[in-house]
Amino acid sequence: MDKPIRIGTRNSELALWQAHLVQKQLQELGHTTEIIELSSIGDEILDIPLHQIGSMGVFTKTLDVAMLRGQIDIAVNSLKDVPTQLPETIVQAAVLERADVNDVVVYKGTEADLLADGATIATGSLRRTAQWLHKYPTHNLTDLRGNVNTRLQKLDDNDWNGAIFAKAGLERINLLPENHLVLDWMIPAPAQGAIMITALESDAYVLEACAQLHHKETALCVGIERDFMKTLEGGCTAPIGGHAEIIEDKVVFKGLLSALDGKEQKGVFRIATLEDAKNLGNICGEEILANGGDVLMKEIKKVIKK
């Protein structure tokens, strides 16, 4: 175990927390490690809505390039930020055990103010925007970009009523305030709450090391969710929610495709045995498309491309 494993990560507080978690687990196995911080396109461009610059990959491309150039051995990312198609020669080395999948809304004032007609809610996510507007059609949604710390500060600095975050991200860096509501009705992003490690497929030493961190149950569930997203998307960013969980010996999946304004939704709910769960995401995605999701996706693509 002489070869040090160079861990590539974005330089936000949350990304570094995730990298240090992986570092700790590898060091407990006897490996020498080094953390290398890099800045991503998604972190640097904050004045353009995420979907307009292509949200899938904007937080991971810098790490992919560094790996291909031999500057890092593994990359640690929030799995929901990782494209469903990895670059050639880069593979999934491990998926860590998942944290809480829920979204939360952090609010100012009272809960009554937050839910009142005309309230303003901030988020940079098309999925969160669409599901929030479906439930609260009189609200105003405004774009919010930046890392967790930046977004919390922007909430303080503006006259918004609230902003939506992933609960796991806030909890991991001890920034979840008391004034929040758990949005257990909101279907999370595919793979929300999970961390992925990627590596070069040719690096047997690193792959063997990371395999010991792999959590099979989480990997099964997020794999279903990402297959669902891939079946629907066709390379287009869209308001897609998907969540799979193992309950006893069954996999329970719920998925959702929303219109950008939240007025129209196409949902799916299925239960499968563990043996039959391999293609569950694809099956559910095809069901959505067959039930009008194909038309809805075409409409979403037209708007996003403008």
Image (cartoon, rainbow, N blue to C red):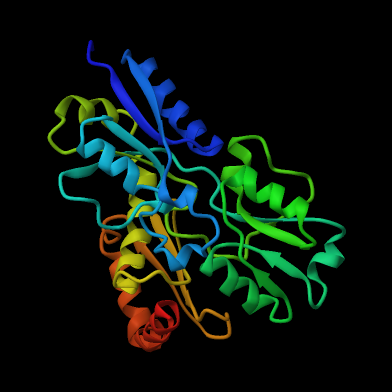
178 relative to 59 in the view: left or right: right
- Seen in the image, is 263 located left or right of residue 224? right
Closest to the observer, 106 or 102: 106
**Where does the N terminus fall, quadrant-wise?**
top left
Could you tell me which residue is drawn at 22 percent across and 27 percent down?
Answer: 206
**How many discs appear?**
0
Q: Residue furthest top?
A: 2
Residue 278 in picture, x, y percent from top left? 26, 59
Q: Quadrant of residue 287?
A: bottom left
Tell me, yes or no, if residue 249 can be seen here: no
- Residue placed most toward the observer, 79 or 251: 79
Image point (35%, 63%), residue name: 272
Where is residue 103 drawn, in percent x and y? 60, 56
Question: How far across and down, in percent of the image, does residue 107 sit?
Answer: 77, 56
**Do we see residue 101 in this rendering?**
yes
**Res 54 → quadrant:** bottom left
Say above or below: 178 vs 158: above
